[in-house]
Amino acid sequence: MPTPIVRLFSEQALVAQTEGLRVTHVEATLALARLSFDGTPSDEREARRVLERFGAVELACLDDVALPPDCDADYVVRPGQGAAALCAFSTDAVPELRRAGFVVEIDRAYPYQVVAHDPAWVARVEPQGRDGWFSLELGVEIDGRTVDLLPLIVDLLDNAGESDDLRALERRAQAAALRLSANEHLTIAPARLRALMRVVVELYQGVRRSAQRVAFPASRTPALAALDEAFGKDGARIRWKDPAGALARGRAILARPTLQEPPRGLRAELRPYQIEGVAFLRHLAEQGLGGILADDMGLGKTLQTIAFLAGEKESGRAKAPSLVVAPTSLAFNWAREIEKFAPFLRVLPIHGAKRGPLYDRIADVDVVVTTYPILVRDEERLGKHEFHALILDEAQAIKNTRTQAFQALQSIRAEHRVCLTGTPVENHLGELWALMRFLDPELLGDELSFRRVYKAPIESEGDEERLGALREQVAPYILRRTKREVAKELPPKTELLRPVELRGKQRELYEAIRVAAHGDVRRVIRQKGLAASTITILDALMKLRQVCCDPRLVAMDAARGVHESAKTEAFFEMIDGLLPAGHRVLVFSQFTSMLALLAEGLRKRDVDYLVLTGQTRDRRAVVDAFERGDADVFLISLKAGGTGLNLVSADTVIHFDPWWNPAAQAQATDRAYRIGQTKPTFVHSMYVAGSVEERVMQLQQRKRWLSSTLLGDEKQERGLSEVEIDRLFSPLEV
């Protein structure tokens, strides 16, 4: 068989007559000229078959490819396939053609030449100044020269729109072909390119120390270890030049911590997952980093933190006292738990009107416990002291960086910072950014870069690649376990929906308010737009929710003549069945006025009860009274009692009215369903069927991703639209 010849030319080159196969490149089309060598028909068919196997299409089958008159071609690679297809031809087809006996000649000006298919990768990491930052160069060695690839990736990120996900950026990078020069490309396997881009997203957030280098803080060094591991799985190796040991630091941060034994003086037997939690906190402290203990409510975050503080004192690492900041309702619990589990820790609660002299005692204690309001008022006094660890309980209290509490925390000096919260993300990713900003201002960058790099692509476009990159970036600093994972000894929990149907005058009142409220909301949205209409919308929805609970909550003349309440009646029917059977009940509502009405009904029925709201002065006494058995019904406002209470003597939870945030209701349920509960627990969610309450519950299901965006596998949903608002105000459906 005569030797067929393939010639790859530049776009301007003329097609040269050859004794065999002719090839030229015309307007991004790889044109394969007519086979004209002297051979048998079977030889020609074999040559054509080889070409077609590499994606060449017979020109006779196409009518949309225009070639110069002197290009007498039989086959083309379609122009629409772009540079990636042409580079792929150079990468894959050329070697195969040569192995098949073709002579391949490549003109020097041919624009889609490729370098070695799998060149050696090199990375250089150097310290940048004295601020704990590093710079990174990452590239390949080609013919003795190093080509830095990071600027190519960074330029893609800099020029990306907020709607561009990483897969779109890969396509913009020609899928797997990066242009190194005018006529030279490097082809990279798509999986490897995706790993490279994800790591660059983690490291680079708009900061360059030079045109060729990406700069990043020490807290992002785990991305280097992730990059090295990803390339290793792909069969490649990176040669590291890292005199400062940044890669080793990244590996150390990612290392799985272990705890040899709990502190000797701790008066508690830690469960295996709690030992892991203490090891997590200690490991981060040893690395000079902060973190978030994000266990489900009821898994003992307080105990794990006390064990961590005890271990810090026992080891001699704590050279200064630690500061615990908690909601006012939980401060007493911290002091009590420390005295119970670690009595050798000297604890100093700072609260009350006469707290001034207490500040003189800080240097003589091991743990200071105060509240967020006191932190704001006494910022200057607390700022004069240095602390070993600064611990925020219910850290979602600082999810808004513009609050006074967040600003006051900036003046507190502490060697280590810890956040305790079962809900690091409740409503949007900006809340996670706020927590991380408190722990390490450099980890996720400033607010603008975080919004551009992560928040907008994830929340607006559902960019799963960016979500994965964010999850990987924060994973070393967050530890979360759920009851389902670690508390298998807990008794079963049964969740029951309790629909109630409105009838008579209460139904008529609901519809009258609904029609008027919906009209007001539509008018305001037309005048101000959706974003500026929030107050009007929430006020209208609150009136409807109040009607669902009890018309006596509605401050309107039209409601005064309506005395029946379907839900209140259903509630007391439940109570009449639960109490004789020996159940003890927690009742949650967002409306303290509703709790007052339920209390009135319980008094009329001679049922003992207790109440906990924001107005309760001695929370500890009320909680202790319920745990002693002084009453079997505990009426609790969701805001005041949704967190920080241990009420395992109850086995029944009633949510009288649904709330937008499912995490808030879950936290309330966890007052009873937590470690220490020995009885099966029943959770009743009451709602008016077909009403705004049922639609709120449907929205809850869509919002559950918010508490697990980074900690689970659920995907993002979008915010409320005008269509969904109209749905909330639609007529009763039953």
Image (spheres, helix red, strand yellow):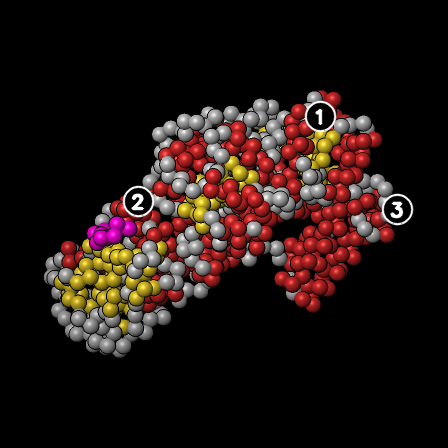
Separation of residues labelled 3 and 1 (CA atoms): 37 Å
Left or right: residue 453 versus residue 65 is right
Marked residue nearer the N-terminal end (3 or 2):
2
Residue at numbered disc 2? 251
* Percent of width and height locating residue 582: 70, 22
Separation of residues labelled 3 and 2 (CA atoms): 70 Å
Q: Residues within 10 Å of mark 3 (few under 14, many from 20)?
A: few
Residue at numbered disc 1? 630
Regarding residue 1, the answer to whether it shows in the image is: yes
Regarding residue 84, the answer to whether it shows in the image is: no
Q: Nearer the viewer, mark 1 or mark 2?
A: 1
Give yes or no for residue 317 being in the magenta stretch. Answer: no
Q: Residue at x 59, y 39 (%)?
A: 330
* Percent of width and height locating residue 189: 29, 54
Separation of residues labelled 1 and 2 (CA atoms): 55 Å
Marked residue nearer the N-terminal end (3 or 1):
3
Q: Amino acid at mark 1?
A: Asp
Question: Tag 3, which secondary structure?
Answer: loop
Give the magenta-colored segment's residue range.
238-246
Q: Residue at x 86, y 42 (%)?
A: 563
Residue at numbered disc 3? 561
**Quarter residue 562 falls in:** top right
**Quarter residue 603 falls in:** top right
* Percent of width and height locating residue 385: 47, 48
Q: Amino acid at mark 2?
A: Arg
Q: Nearer the viewer, mark 3 or mark 2?
A: 2
